[in-house]
Amino acid sequence: MRKRVSMGRQKIEIKKIENEEARQVCFSKRRNGLFKKASELSTLCGAEICIVIFSPAGKAFSFGHPSVDSVADRFLSSATKTNSASAANHAVHNQNGMKIGRIAAGSPTIRELSRQCTELNGMLETERKRREKLEVAIVKKEDEGGFNKAIVDGIDELNLSELEEYEKALLNLRGSVAERANQLLLEAMTHRQLQQQQQQGPHFSVPVKAEVGGVMPGAFHTLHGGFGFQRGFYGSF
């Protein structure tokens, strides 16, 4: 008689059971098996155990020794103390006293950040001192009447576009100076004429202008500002 060959215990593939009824039966069996193993572990080893399971339908099942509440409270209080101690130990500050994160103080990240912060502070201090020196130099140049020289010295550092803008600004400035100078000259001449009329009394007077070679006697020209003025003498009868 031929001996029957047994295939032995087959391994079940671990994947989600598609049949809803079979899935519910499997859940109930394995839940009870899990609770049984937890009870045996607590009995054999004296361990405090808490297990909470939610079924696919959302129903909660729990097991605890000595109770679910006591184990859960102990776990939560322990976790709170651990987090507080960790936060106190890992709070890191840079050299300026500013909090920069909850990272281990001896970590390479903190050392690198501290080094960069120190370098930036040094660069900032250097630039601040440089600005103070420039401000002092400018004030000194103004006091010595050498402000224009300070401007000219900086022309070598300008590019073509900046030089063109600088030229436009100078031309505008020259026009403004010429306009202001003409205005002042006209006011001075008017004031002088009024003084002459007051000194001469009721005599009738007319301006007499004599030109010599196209330039009135007493006229003056200036080329330094890019503009010129002509002033004539006034006579009276």
Image (spheres, helix red, strand yellow):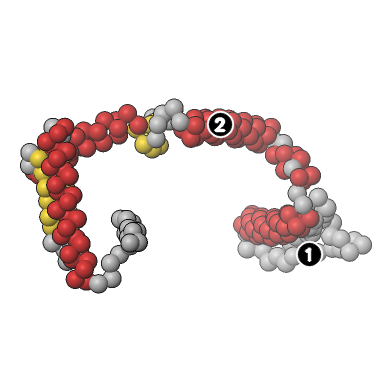
Specify whether 192 is left or right of 16: right
Circle nearer the N terminus (1, 2) = 2
Describe residue 135's horizontal placement relative to residue 103 as left or right: right
Residue 12 image-quadrant placement: bottom left
Can residue 206 be spotted in the picture?
Answer: yes
Residue at image x 53%, y 30%?
A: 115
Front in this rendered view, residue 95 or 229: 95
Q: Going 73% across and 67% down the picture, which residue do you hit?
A: 206
Residue pointed to by mark 1: 208
Residue 119 tag number = 2
Residue 77 in view:
no
Foreground of the two, 182 or 58: 58
Instruction: Residue 235: name its quadrant.
Output: bottom right
Q: Callout 1: helix, strand or loop? A: loop
Residue 125 percent location from the top left of the image: 55, 31
Label 2: which secondary element: helix
